[in-house]
Image (tube, grey):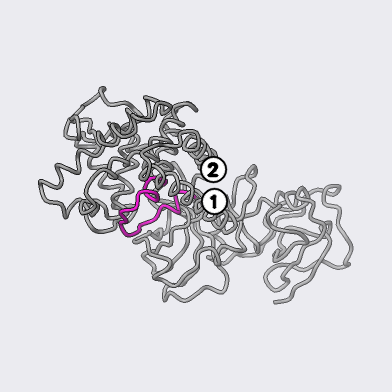
Amino acid sequence: MAIKRIPIDSVIVGMYLCGIDQSWLNTPFLLHRFPIKTQTDINKLKTCGILAIDIDTERGIDVPPPPAPIALEDQGAPPPSTLSLSPEEERIAHLPEDLKGVSLALELTTIKHTRDQFLDEVHELLDALAKTGQVEVEKMNACSQSIIEETLHHEEAYIALIRTREFSPALYDHALTVSTLAILLGRASGLDDADLQYLGTAGLLHDVGLLYLPTQLQRPLKTLSATELAIYQTHPQRGVDGLAKNPNLAPKVLRLISEHHEALDGTGFPAKLSGENIDLSSRILRIADEYDELLSGHQNAETLSVRTALQLLFQKGNRGALDPALVARFINVIGIYPTYSLVELNTGERGIVTGNSRDNLLQPMILLIQDADHQPLSEPIPLNFSVLSTEAAKPQIISVLSPEEAGISVESVLEEWITL
């Protein structure tokens, strides 16, 4: 590698950029190292206030003799480069002009910290409720509002943190997760600010009725006897009865809690409501709740993948138990391969999902990090399925892996990469 720092006015198409004189956080580029293909790339660098860049003269052209700065804006764009690109470079997807980059690793680390703070707060509020029977309504509403504000600004990062995990009888993690998911689906469904607030609060409180049940019922539903299941199915009404002692809690919140297990076809509980008798927000809460139960193993005593959980929700929508339009919208919100997922291709290569196309959820953008033999690549390769040539067989995602089991730290891999 032959690295040379040159002034920005000496940059021309055909050079290979491998460094800049400032933080990449201030630039709209997906990559930290890439061939400069167009005058637009150079203009972006100048717009970001970059005064000098590092070029690799072994992978791109050098400064032409004589070594004098070239004022490209006065002389027009140079002729396009005739350099041939490697197959890997041809797979690189460029972001649209109007997008600005953020650090995926920084966002994920920040959101993890924020979510941990929310977990502590929800834990404290629900613990106080269990001990006193009273809801600190103002604190609960404030917590819900904070979750709304954070979630809607960092949608994909929060979705990524809602991962398959072992079932826990503790309410607070599930409560926060359901509230978060319900808020995202509610926003996508056009709910106004007031209804989002009701929905977020109901998500935090939807399972408080379980506090009034015997502790031996706090286990996966598949393991309950018929008698135990019948008792379990009283928890929505028990929750409403207990919370009704709090006069400052909005009646709409109580309704959503009472209906969060109802089904459009009348097979739900406890009241066996059907169709339009079930509030739209209650239908949203049901989908969010069931999705997390499938991920955590609360329903079937086994954790399911995101894709399998979404498939089961889709099937329930087709059968009429869940609102099919809301299920379709939820799948679009979650994405079949959520951002930060570790996936394996049919080629054996592995990568991290860095973005999704809402038009085709099966074709995300990923950052390849391992080759077909699962060995680390010397330099990660961005891959956008949607721009691959249709003439050749496209690689396909065949599985979603656990980063921990694969020994991969997603944050560490993404530390130097910028995307949306």
- State the extent of the magenta-drawn residues as a range: 158-176
Q: Are marks 2 and 1 in contact (CB under 8 Å)?
A: yes
- Where disc 1 sits, the SS reads helix
Percent position of residue 353, x then y:
47, 57
Dot 2 amino acid type: Glu
Q: Nearer the viewer, mark 2 or mark 1?
A: 1
Percent position of residue 307, x then y:
32, 52
Q: Nearer the viewer, residue 1 or 292?
A: 292
In this view, the residue farthest toward the front is: 132
Query: Is residue 203 covered in magenta?
Result: no
Q: Is residue 205 left or right of residue 340?
A: left
Q: Residue at x 54, y 38 (%)?
A: 149
In this view, the residue farthest toward the top is: 276
Q: Nearer the viewer, residue 138 or 197?
A: 138
| Residue on which disc 1 sits | 114
Percent position of residue 142, x then y:
52, 36
Dot 1 amino acid type: Thr
- Mark 2, residues whose alpha carbon is within 10 Å: few (<14), some, or many (≥20)? some
Q: Is residue 109 left or right of residue 234?
A: right
Percent position of residue 85, x then y:
60, 64
Q: Residue at x 45, y 54 (%)?
A: 161
Image quadrant containing the N terminus: bottom right
Query: Is residue 168 covered in magenta?
Result: yes
| Quarter where residue 82 is shown | bottom right
Q: Residue at x 41, y 29 (%)?
A: 249
| Residue on which disc 2 sits | 150
